Image (cartoon, rainbow, N blue to C red):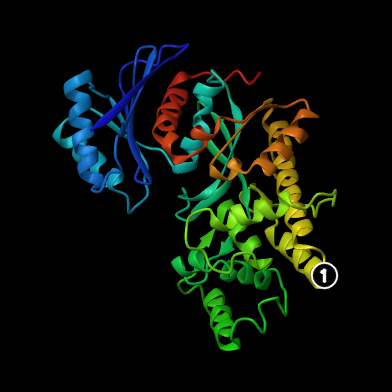
Amino acid sequence: MFSVTQTPLKFDGGRRILALGTDTRPGLCWVDGKTLFQLSPRLEAEDIEEFYRQAVAFAVRRYCVRPAVIAFDPHPHFACRRLAPLLQKELFPSARLQAVYHHWAHVANAVFDMQTRRPFIGAAFDGTGFGADGRMWGGEFFYCSAKGFVRAGHLDYQPLAGNEAAIREPWRIAYGILRTAGAGRTPFSGKIPAKTLRLIDQMIARGVQTPLSSSAGRLFDAAAALLGLTPAVAKQAQAAQALEAAAASCGQEVGSYGMPIARSRDGCLVLDTGFLFIAMQRDLAHRMAKEAIAMKFHSALAEGIFFVCKRLARRYGVPRVYVSGGVFLNRILTQKITGLFGKSRLRLLVPPPPLMTDAAIARGQIGYCLMRRSGVDDKK
């Protein structure tokens, strides 16, 4: 029913943290001294809440798990959030609940992968995850220390006109980015009925069924749609893979668009996605090859990530950078980022592919809790 792996640690993690992970890839994680335990279902769980109950019961019975802290993803619609206080009440009344936001967990895996609990800059780029401001995140930069994980930068918010419809039809996201950036006529004029475009304009202006998202995954979807590669999406990562494939077919040096960095009212550094899409639309109008535009998009995003991390490293006085999330499975993007960091004095760590996915969220929740209670604040 369950598969349990054990990983030795170079430091003592204690015995008192249980992480429930996230509903997108349900699994448990806990530490026992210098051993990290990870539990996952052998088959895909059909009833997530029932999986959690059976998995926790197994961990208690087989491994005598008795947590002082229960970590979970605070997404309001997730079973792990609903179950955490129930487990506390029924099994672990002395345990404290610890919400660990999705993207905190992604970058907190650095505690294990870098084998340090010293402060670092973390970048989490993926499809989506519930953020601390109640919006959907996915292109995030954090300053991570024992005092907390501070959101220090992000991709500009994109309107998702139609909510779930925008994920299935990412041309809606591309259109919204362009219109929000001030574009008049777009490549979708003439392809999409004018009545539909007017409706989307109204939805964006009024904020009706149009949540805002800083997701890098949605940005890739929108870029693919703008280039006409995937006007509709049938499976996860389909559009992003099409965009990567187009860039891989470029075969020449084409430069980059660049991405201006603004500063929000709360001090966050914000990468200007509107500027990027206006530039892509201009190249489309000049009939530049789609493969070249796709490559310039990858270069611009890689440079944007690097320069935000560089500025944050200087602001906080830390040399370590850790990147994670499914977007970094894109080889072109990761290679470009690695090349940029290789020319700097910053120390970049890119985890292996399995640890970039949501399968490592429970592990990251443990890392977050260990870092917060470590008290280590040596920046060097």
Question: Which element is circle 1 on?
Answer: loop
Residue 366, compared with residue 186, is above or below; it is: above
Residue 308 location (% of width, % of height): 70, 42
Residue 322, compared with residue 168, is above or below; it is: above
- Is 73 displayed left or right of 222 in the figure? left
Residue 178, compared with residue 356, is above or below; it is: below
Q: In which quadrant will I find the C terminus?
A: top right
Query: What count of labels does the image hold?
Result: 1
Q: Is residue 10 visible?
A: yes
- Is 174 displayed left or right of 86 in the figure? right
Seen as rendered, the residue at the extreme bottom is 195
Residue 282 location (% of width, % of height): 80, 69
Residue drawn at x 70%, y 76% as measured from the top left: 186
Residue drawn at x 39%, y 12% as measured from the top left: 34
Residue that carries the numbered disc 1 in the rendered image:
287
Residue drawn at x 22%, y 22% as measured from the top left: 66
Residue 138, compared with residue 169, is above or below; it is: above
Residue 148 location (% of width, % of height): 50, 32
- Is 126 displayed left or right of 227 in the figure? left
Q: Quadrant of residue 326?
A: top right
Seen as rendered, the residue at the extreme left is 90
Q: Quadrant of residue 124?
A: top right
Q: In which quadrant will I find the N terminus?
A: top left
Query: Which residue occupies the foreground of this view, 319 or 93?
Result: 319
Q: Residues within 10 Å of mark 1 (few under 14, many from 20)?
A: few
Residue 193 location (% of width, % of height): 58, 86
The type of residue carrying mark 1 is: Arg
- Is 3 displayed left or right of 221 in the figure? left
Q: Is residue 148 visible?
A: no
